[in-house]
Image (spheres, grey):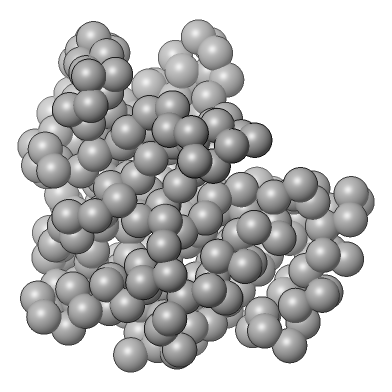
Amino acid sequence: MKISLITVCLNSADTIRDTILSVLAQDYANIEHVIIDGGSTDGTLEIISEFKDQVAVVVSEKDSGIYDAMNKGIRLASGDIVGTINSDDIYSDNRVISNVVNEFLVSGAQSVYADLEIVARNNLSQRVRFYGSSKFRVSRFRWGWMPPHPTFFVRRDCYKKLGLYKTNYRVAADFELLARFLYRDKISFRRLPKCIVKMREGGVSSQGVWGRIHQNLEIVRACKENHIYTNFFLILFKVPLKLLEYTGIGLTQRR
């Protein structure tokens, strides 16, 4: 079973090496790493070129945003399974992909997701928050909850049948895609009960109050497009529940 891992980057010189090394450290052999760069000018491409014999596909060109770049990567991917790893994230250990593949083989599911921890930007051993997936149910999309997107792996034919990321979303196209796949089109899924990704603090959707409001409005729109009953106030209900992440219970929603 071939696994395609897609990394989207733009001016990620400080972190892209860690991401590539994390993929190369995996003990699973049949991995295709696809890197889509948005036209970096900070040395990112020079770092990527150091691994030109180990990274399967590298594209560097202007795009219309992160989701456009993800779609480019999916179109170029040739694996049976497709996952994404952000340019400032790493896998938690060298058996992550082996464990994911085993879950697909044992369960026969169309998709697999797991847990994630958010770590300090300059100290990957320092956990800041925990994004658990054990409490996820498709009914919780109406509250703005989804499995951790960086831990989501799906059979490539699902993209062919059900579509790619919608580029008319600025920050919540990942939520819309998971809602479409898991809720509307009811693809099968299994949870891998492990923390498999370390995500550095920050990100497109971590932009303060107004950024969060815009994200929530996009989530409401995504729910409506996929026939999920919700409203802005139901989405806001996840805010007090988000405090539970600091207790270690792991009910947080974060991209």
Q: How far across and how far down the image is residue 107, in percent?
A: 9, 76
For the point 43% across and 27% down, the residue is 128
Identify the residue shown where x is 77% and y is 82%.
Answer: 52
Q: Residue 171 location in percent, x, y?
A: 50, 35
Give the left or right position of residue 132, taking residue 203 as reference: left
Rendering coords of residue 189 (x, y %): 15, 62
Instruction: Say whether residue 245 is left or right of residue 167.
Output: left
Report the front residue among 250 and 174: 250
- 252 relative to 218 in the view: left or right: left
Residue 80 visible somewhere in the drawing: yes
Vertical side of 66 occupied by 108: above or below? below
Number of numbered tags placed on the structure image: 0
- Which residue: 27% across, 23% down? 245
Residue 8 seen in the current view: no
Q: Quadrant of the C terminus?
A: top left
Against 139, residue 196 (above or below) is: below
